[in-house]
Amino acid sequence: MTRRKLIAGNWKMNGDLAALAELEGIARAADSAGNVEVAMALPATLIAPAVAATPGLAIGAQDVHPAPRGAHTGCISVAMIAEAGARFSIVGHSERRADNYETDADVKAKATALLAGGLSAILCVGETLEQREAGKAEAVVTGQLTASLPKGAAADWLSIAYEPVWAVGTGRTPTVADIAAMHGAIRATLRTAIGADADAMRLLYGGSVTGDNAAALLAAGDVDGALVGGASLTAAKFVPIIEAAAGLD
Ligand code: PEP
């Protein structure tokens, strides 16, 4: 099964209006990258101006609240990001699981809200270093996936990002073999959960992806793209990752 590669950037709590100039180079690279899909998860304040500046680029959010509205100070709903022009949101990023104590049930509710609102989701799972060293990485990741996978999970709106917590923002990555093994386990878990559509669902790797390691990491078995933090902040660092994906097509 051929799956269209997805390269997604995550600016986290970085960027301002001036930084949107970076999106122009990224959009140009996306245009010439053939069959590679490029998406950018931006701070909520930048979604509408980014959509206006680069209408061809898929712009999204980094998190949403599962409720449609209400007394949730500081949160943002699916309808709000959709109105701003977002096409998707990340859910379950390890920084939100750690900083905001988000559970698998929370992540599932957020993904469910995105589906109901007609938006796509990138659902993150990943083990800590302690869990990997204890030999529990696969059990932890597939357990998170099973518990956070929403009803209605399907390849046309949902992607899974495997992001080992110890690789996010650290400059460390698992071996290509370890990534391929984990993605194989994720694919098998998805087959059990949703059947044949699992083979169409994109599995992204995330954690210290750069222009230097992208080609090797993206060529790993069952890797259909990347979720990129630090190296997505500038066109100079992100474009080589898009080009690496295009080169594997
Ligand atoms: C991320 O934020 O999802 C991420 C993978 O970050 P980095 O690429 O900086 O490790």
Image (cartoon, rainbow, N blue to C red):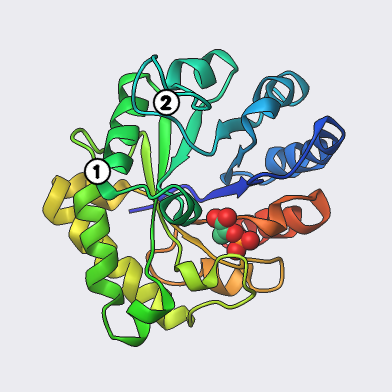
Residue at 74% across / 37% down in the picture? 27
Horizontal side of 54 relative to 197 (left or right) equals right
Residue at screen point 26% across, 68% down: 140
Report how far apart the C-alphas of labels 1 and 2 lie in the structure.
Answer: 19 Å
**Amino acid carrying mark 2 in the image:** Leu
Q: What's under tag 1, amino acid-wise?
A: Ala
| Residue marked by disc 1 | 105
Place residue 107 in its image quadrant. Answer: top left
- For the question of whether residue 3 can be seen, the reply is yes
* In front of the other: 12 or 24: 12
- Tag 1, which secondary structure? helix
Q: Give the percent coordinates (x, y) of residue 134.
A: 30, 86
Q: Which label is found at residue 221?
A: none
Mark 2: give few (<14), some (14-19) or many (20+) Cα within 10 Å.
many
Q: Where does residue 227 sit, x and y in percent of width and height?
A: 54, 54
In the displayed structure, 22 sits above or below 246; it is above
Q: Residue at the spot x=60%, y=17% of the render?
A: 84
Give me the residue at 47% from left, 67% from top. 165
Secondary structure, mark 2, is loop
Give the position of the C terminus as an image quadrant: bottom right
* Of residues 130 and 232, the one drawn nearer to the viewer in this rendering: 130
Residue 171 x/y as whole percent: 64, 75
Image label count: 2
Q: In this view, does 161 lie above or below 113?
A: below
User: Relative to residue 33, is residue 157 drawn left or right?
Assistant: left
- How crowded pointer 1 is (Cα within 10 Å; few <14, some 14-19, many 20+) is rated as some
**Residue indicated by mark 2:** 119
Please tell me in which quarter of the rendered image ligand 1 is found.
bottom right
